[in-house]
Image (spheres, rainbow, N blue to C red):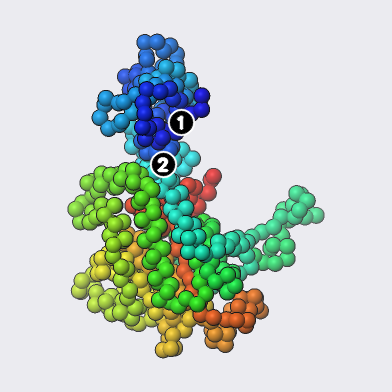
């Protein structure tokens, strides 16, 4: 008999028919009640075993983590909580699990650190099951938004010769000889230093390539893996993360802000509609965690309220100059102690400043725009004042920067001038400059770190917990 997913069983409209379910045992109580989970939903289905007619040998093998198949009648559940359960007629152990050794014991409440070391098994917990389903739905929402609006999905290269502004430290690509015997004459491993004669790296951003496509297709987006050799061990940085980068011809900075805000609100709404149970579960987890914290550290809003708040309120748009004025007010003797004090226009904001603006001052998502040219990348559109660029960063409570974007410099001469001043080789970016040579036009785009979005939507606090296999300096084992 073909199995039915637990989610569908729990949403059945009829009972008293024969069903089969397959999944993994979460718990087994009183030699009778199995809580079975198959990953389709946060909920387990209760399977009631006829223990008098089941051999002891079989009962012993119903252990946490074991894979089983149950066939029986779907009946209404008398217990609280669930509508249906399975009255088991036939039980098969598909794969045993040594209960003593299985690392994920629900009773022990394993720590997040411990679970990170067991990334291959942590997905068997309710928390990680929920996070991974939410992540999956969010990525579908990304495509849904752009596809509905007629954007073209572009796969920009992962191995590239461009370092896109030096957005971070890069991983260099090293090619081994084709013959599989990478040895030099004296027996040493013979790594080629580059990609068949050309120096390349793993992409840090698909933007520059994306721009060339936007200048033909009008509106494009990328959504792919991005690599930065971040050796900083923060809870917001991964060495491998997924980035969403739309790029739109004929859009200026304001259009770009509108797009980013509309996009973020859409994907959050979409996910709230599709994942109510998982989000409710994650909210409950957070509330439990909050109770154990000192009052001052508790977050003010439960998860769903926080998500609704983002849907219902416009993001506050603030220029860099206004932000600096606000931060300057917060000298050590006044409202807030910063580790790094901003005392002049032109300084780059640190994450403590960004979070202060969002969490304490404005208390809502903030779009900061018109940054000093000298702290932003070469390709951003210079304003008429000659000292600021049309850049924007979107800052979120609990996260800090979630989006970085800009209107791009469309004027060939200004761009080349800027590159010269920064020592960026014109020859190497000849293909990029072609977009300004042939039919240049105003255009803009942004990069949104997908994991930072998942962090926000799930309420998790460490980026290592929202990607299946985090790549950080300590985590590259599998
Ligand atoms: P940050 O200031 O947090 O280091 P950034 O300014 O270096 O970020 P950008 O180059 O603007 O990042 O990249 C666009 C977006 O990609 C960021 O707004 C962020 O959401 C995300 N991002 C950047 N670096 C990482 C990383 N190492 N891990 C996860 N997401 C990242
Ligand atoms: Mg960075
Ligand atoms: Mg930044
Ligand atoms: Mg940035």
Vertical position of residue 317 compared to residue 420: above or below: above
| One can see residue 376 in this view | no
Q: Are marks 2 and 1 in contact (CB under 8 Å)?
A: no
The C terminus: image quadrant:
top right
Image position of 173 (left or right of 273)? right
Identity of the residue drawn at 20% across and 56% down: 296
- Residue carrying label 1: 4
- Residue carrying label 2: 129
| One can see residue 84 in this view | yes
Q: Residue lying furthest front in this view?
A: 14
Q: x and y percent of residue 72 in the render?
A: 42, 20
Dot 1 falls on a residue whose secondary structure is loop
Q: x and y percent of residue 59 in the render?
A: 41, 17
Identity of the residue drawn at 76% across and 53% down: 178
Label 1 packing within 10 angstroms: few (<14), some (14-19), many (20+): few
Label 2 packing within 10 angstroms: few (<14), some (14-19), many (20+): some
Identity of the residue drawn at 67% across and 67% down: 199
Residue 463 falls in image quadrant: bottom left
Dot 2 falls on a residue whose secondary structure is helix
Q: Front-most of 146 and 409? A: 146
Q: Earlier in the sequence, mark 2 or mark 1?
A: 1
Image position of 40 (left or right of 208)? left
Identity of the residue drawn at 59% across and 72% down: 216
Vertical position of residue 55 compared to residue 210: above or below: above
Q: How many marks?
A: 2
- Ligand 1's quadrant is bottom left
Q: Front-most of 154 and 460? A: 154
Q: x and y percent of residue 84 in the render?
A: 33, 28
Q: x and y percent of residue 242 in the render?
A: 50, 57
């Amino acid at each position: 008999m073909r199995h039915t997913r637990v989610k569908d069983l729990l949403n059945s409209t009829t009972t008293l028919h024969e069903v089969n379910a397959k999944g993994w045992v979460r718990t087994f109580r009183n030699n009778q009640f199995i809580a079975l989970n198959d990953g389709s939903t946060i909920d387990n289905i209760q399977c009631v075993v006829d223990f008098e007619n089941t051999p002891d040998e079989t009962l012993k093998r119903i252990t946490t983590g074991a894979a089983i198949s149950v066939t029986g009648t779907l009946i209404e559940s008398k217990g609280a909580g669930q509508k249906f359960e399975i009255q088991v007629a036939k039980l098969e152990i598909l794969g045993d699990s040594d209960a003593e050794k299985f690392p994920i014991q629900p009773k022990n409440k394993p720590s997040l650190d411990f679970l990170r070391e067991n990334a291959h098994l942590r997905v068997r917990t309710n928390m990680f099951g929920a996070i991974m389903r939410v992540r999956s739905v969010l990525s579908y929402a990304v495509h849904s938004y752009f596809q509905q609006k007629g954007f073209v999905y572009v796969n920009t290269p992962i191995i590239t010769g461009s370092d896109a502004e030096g957005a971070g430290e890069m991983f260099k690509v090293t090619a081994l000889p084709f013959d599989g015997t990478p040895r030099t004459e004296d027996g040493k491993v013979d790594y080629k230093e580059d990609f068949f004669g050309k120096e390349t790296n793993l992409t840090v951003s698909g933007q520059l390539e994306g721009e060339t496509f936007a200048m033909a297709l009008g509106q494009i987006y990328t959504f792919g893996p991005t690599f930065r050799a971040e050796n900083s061990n923060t809870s917001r940085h991964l060495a491998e993360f997924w980035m969403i980068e739309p790029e739109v011809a004929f859009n200026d900075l304001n259009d770009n802000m509108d797009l980013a805000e509309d996009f973020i609100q859409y994907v959050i709404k979409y996910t709230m509609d599709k994942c109510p149970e998982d989000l409710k579960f994650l909210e409950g987890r957070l509330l439990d965690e909050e109770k154990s914290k000192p009052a001052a550290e508790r977050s003010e809003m439960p998860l769903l309220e926080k998500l609704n708040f983002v849907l219902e309120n416009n993001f506050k748009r603030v220029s860099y100059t206004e932000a600096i004025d606000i931060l300057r007010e917060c000298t050590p003797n006044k409202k807030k102690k910063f580790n790094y004090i901003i005392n002049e226009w032109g300084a780059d904001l640190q994450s403590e400043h960004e979070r202060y603006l969002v969490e304490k001052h404005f208390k809502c998502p903030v779009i900061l725009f018109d940054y000093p040219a000298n702290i932003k990348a070469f390709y951003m559109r210079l304003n008429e004042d000659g000292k600021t660029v049309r850049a924007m960063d979107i800052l979120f409570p609990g996260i800090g920067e979630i989006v970085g974007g800009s209107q791009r410099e469309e004027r060939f001469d200004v761009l080349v001038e800027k590159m010269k001043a920064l020592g960026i080789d014109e020859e190497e970016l000849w293909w990029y400059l072609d977009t300004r040579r042939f039919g240049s036009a105003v255009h803009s785009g942004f990069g949104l770190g997908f994991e930072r979005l998942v962090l926000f939507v799930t309420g998790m606090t460490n980026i290592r917990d929202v990607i299946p296999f985090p790549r950080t300096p300590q985590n590259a084992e599998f």
